[in-house]
Image (cartoon, rainbow, N blue to C red):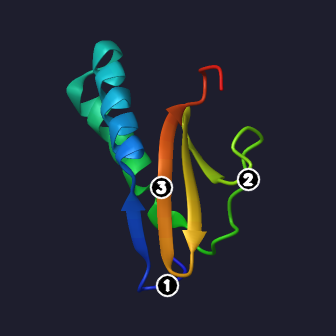
């Protein structure tokens, strides 16, 4: 992490995206596997070592993206705040 004082905020849209992903995963995986994948997604922002570490997305040009398995975590950083905008399945049509 690039700062001990970093704050990570999850938008309502991102939280809803996580819920949808979890329900989708439960249809195809065990509860433990679904939870593990969801945990990887949720913890991905803490791996940011500097704000510009991840690429801008070609479809959401104002957001950087973290790719976790088949999922994209979109974020914008401002000062010491990482705002998670949304989380989507990268296999879907943008």
The label shown at residue 3 is 1
The label shown at residue 56 is 2
Whole-percent x and y of residue 54?
68, 59
Farthest-out residue, bottom: 4
In the picture, which quadrant includes the C terminus? top right
Looking at the picture, tell me which residue is in the foreground, 87 or 28: 87
N-term mark: 2 or 1: 1
Check disc 3: other Cα within 10 Å, few if <14, some if 14-19, many if 20+.
Answer: many
Judge whether 68 appears above or below 78 on screen: above
Secondary structure at badge 3 equals strand
What residue is shown at x 48% (from left), y 40% (from top)?
A: 87
What residue is shown at x 72% (from left), y 45% (from top)?
A: 57
66 displayed left or right of 14: right
Secondary structure at badge 2 equals loop
Farthest-out residue, right: 58
Calculate the distance from the C-alpha at mark 2 to the C-alpha at mark 1: 21 Å
Whole-percent x and y of residue 31?
22, 27
Secondary structure at badge 1 equals loop
N-term mark: 2 or 3: 2
Whole-percent x and y of residue 40?
41, 47
Calculate the distance from the C-alpha at mark 2 to the C-alpha at mark 3: 14 Å
Q: Which residue is mark 3?
A: 84
């Amino acid at each position: 992490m690039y700062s001990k004082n970093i704050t990570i905020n999850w938008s309502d849209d991102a939280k809803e995206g996580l819920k949808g992903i979890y329900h989708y995963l439960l249809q195809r995986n065990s509860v433990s596997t679904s939870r593990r994948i969801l945990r990887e997604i949720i913890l991905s922002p803490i791996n940011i070592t500097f704000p510009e570490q991840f690429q801008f997305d070609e479809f959401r040009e104002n957001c950087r993206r973290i790719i976790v398995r088949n999922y994209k975590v979109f974020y914008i950083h401002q000062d010491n705040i990482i705002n998670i905008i949304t989380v989507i399945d990268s296999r879907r049509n943008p």
